Amino acid sequence: MGWNPSLEPEGPQKSSFDSVETVIMPRSRDLGGFSVARVLPSAKRRMIGPFVFLDHFGPTRFDPGEGGIDVRPHPHIGLATVTYLLEGEFQHRDSLGTNQMIYPGEVNWMIAGHGIAHSERTSDATRAKGHALLGLQTWVALPKTHEDMAPAFEHVERTALPHLEADGLDARLILGTAYGEHAPVKTFQEMFYLSAMLRAGASMALPDTHEERGLYLLSGSVLIGDMAFEACQLLVFKPGENITLTAGADGAEFVLLGGEPMDGPRYLWWNFVASTKDRIEAAKADWLDPERRAKRFPLPPDDASDFIPLPDH
């Protein structure tokens, strides 16, 4: 799409830190030369709209024939996972028999529902040629009405995502609705998830149709009024405010996300998300028991030789 007036700042804007409710700094881990920053959940904020988990992985570079991602099959319940790459590629396989490569700008949307197991690995072909990797993995909690739905998987090509352009802005809508556009992925509550690049000095208005909104800055800097924010910060905004972002001297690359508040609290333990602790305890027991695991969380048909065991704490 072309110029969108809803992206342009209008009306009185906040000129100070007052628009920002919380600033979160991620916790980083080095997994053998592979950096992962855990952004959500945080002690300061458990979720933003339905988004209960956000990991920022990379940037990293793997030499030909050396290194890669090898996340063995593991289970999920009560959520949908969203993988979005900015650089690199890897292979997703799951209980449904899905075997899907993902590349930058595409969306892998896996609905766990009652239960699914999946793996994420660097393919043999990718490993052989060497590669870089940079991206985001987010979890969206399912509403209570869909916690026990059958698992599903959807892959969306980059060209199918709504493309938003304005003066100095280039963005793609990954999930949900924003700025009058609707992403093709099937979702179950009101939300939005947007990947954006803003040229130095350019400005954009935040979507104003969602109660809960956050921004995670991947690179560069943004100004909100007279306050500057740097890369690797998650900003959570106060509801109902008209907010304009302006990119700093080096521009900015970021994601915006949020939506309506969840229909109650969510409990997270390992890879499980649920509206009650009893649901998590049942999932633990099913993953531990071989017969129940095979029924509820069948391993990917072409990646079933090993799996991640249940943690002991």
Image (spheres, grey):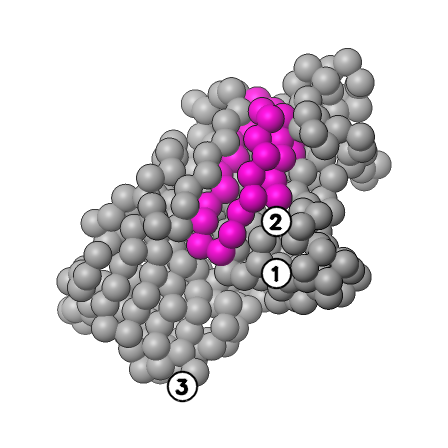
Residue at image mark 2: 90
Q: CA distance from mark 2 to mark 1?
A: 9 Å
Which is nearer the N-term, disc 2 or disc 1?
A: 2
What's the CA distance linking mark 1 and mark 3?
26 Å
Give how far across and how far down residue 117 sits, in percent: 65, 30
Residue 283 visible at all: no
Q: For label 2, count other residues whose C-alpha is less than 10 Å away and answer few (under 14), some (14-19) or many (20+).
A: many
* Quadrant in which the N terminus is drawn: bottom left
Question: Which residue type does callout 1 highlight?
Answer: Leu
| Spot occupied by residue 121 in the image (x, y as percentages of width and height) | 68, 45
SS at mark 3 in the image: strand
Give amino acid for label 2: Phe
Task: Estimate the spatial distance between the alpha carbons at disc 2 and disc 3, rounded to whole Å.
Answer: 33 Å
Where is residue 186 drawn, in percent x and y? 37, 33
Q: Which residue is mark 3?
A: 249
Q: Residues within 10 Å of mark 3 (few under 14, many from 20)?
A: few
Image coordinates of residue 273 in percent, x first then y, are 59, 34
Q: Which residues are magenta?
A: 90-118
From the image, tell me which residue sits under label 1. Answer: 133
Find out whether residue 200 is within the magenta segment: no
- For badge 3, the amino acid type reads Ala
Q: Residues within 10 Å of mark 1 (few under 14, many from 20)?
A: many
